[in-house]
Amino acid sequence: MLPTLFSVVLLGGALSMHEPMTQDQAIRVATQAASKQLNLPLEQFSVQQAHAVDWPDSSLGCPQPGMMYLQVITPGFKVMLKAGAEIYPVHVAGTRAVVCVQGAGDARGPKTQAAQEKVELVTRARARLAALLKVDVAKIQVHAIRTGSFGDAPGCVDGTSKDKAGGKFVELEYAGRRYEYGADADEVRECAK
């Protein structure tokens, strides 16, 4: 067994901050980071799984005790790589990759829980818009998240949610057009403009 491992690897300028990352780019960044950190040849890694994720903060889902992170939802990917008998989760956003293994990232407190709830709502809103537009979810960008009541956004009210006082609003963008989604614990829906 390897000791607890936490690594952040920054890889040079392959992506602009404005271009969404593709799954293939995420796999490449993850494999390079794992190879460098674990001192294993690139060829030894095989991809077990890769999927888009909205990380709750700049720790990319793998916070290190004693460190502070920007509280911003960060679109990226979770890539599971196998080398020999071991599987390594690598969390990726842009050119940044975190090899997150053996207990790292298990810290859960009230702030982390609230951030995770926001991430889940944003993930649902992005998935719904991607399905509606028939595009890759990684191309849907998050612009803002705010809390409020559905009465504040009349286009988000329907017969079942009128009386609900609390919710979150997620502003998304695709191809220069903005979309607002209202979300509560039960559902996510587009707000009419």
Image (cartoon, rainbow, N blue to C red):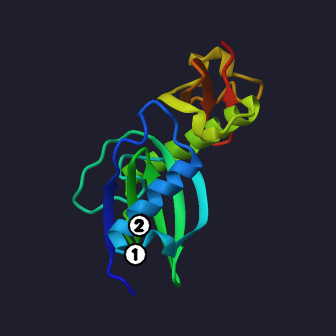
Q: Residue at x 69, y 35 (%)?
A: 130
Q: Quadrant of the N terminus?
A: bottom left
Whether label 2 touches label 1, CB < 8 Å: yes
In the image, residue 178 sits, relative to residue 140, either above or below, namely above
Q: Does residue 47 appear anywhere in the picture?
A: yes
| Residue 27 point in image, percent of width and height | 53, 56
Q: Looking at the picture, tell me which residue is in the foreground, 166 or 109.
A: 109
- Residue that carries the numbered disc 1 in the rendered image: 40
Check disc 1: other Cα within 10 Å, few if <14, some if 14-19, many if 20+: few
Within 10 Å of disc 2 (Cα), the crowding (few <14, some 14-19, many 20+) is many
Q: What is the three-letter code of the residue carrying label 2?
A: Ala
Image height of 171 relative to 75, above or below: above
Q: Is residue 75 above or below residue 179?
A: below
Residue ID at (50%, 71%): 43
Q: Which mark is residue 189?
A: none
Q: Nearer the viewer, residue 122 or 77?
A: 77
Q: CA distance from mark 2 to mark 1?
A: 8 Å
Q: Which quarter of the rendered picture does the C terminus lie within?
A: top right
Q: Nearer the viewer, residue 61 or 85?
A: 85
Q: Residue at x 32, y 58 (%)?
A: 8
Label 2: state its secondary structure.
Answer: helix
Residue 137, percent from left and from top: 63, 39
- Residue type at tag 1: Leu
Q: Is residue 146 visible?
A: no
61, above or below 182, in the image: below
Q: Earlier in the sequence, mark 2 or mark 1?
A: 2
Q: Which residue is mark 2?
A: 34
Q: Which quadrant of the figure has residue 105?
A: bottom left
Secondary structure under the numbered disc 1 in the rendered image: loop
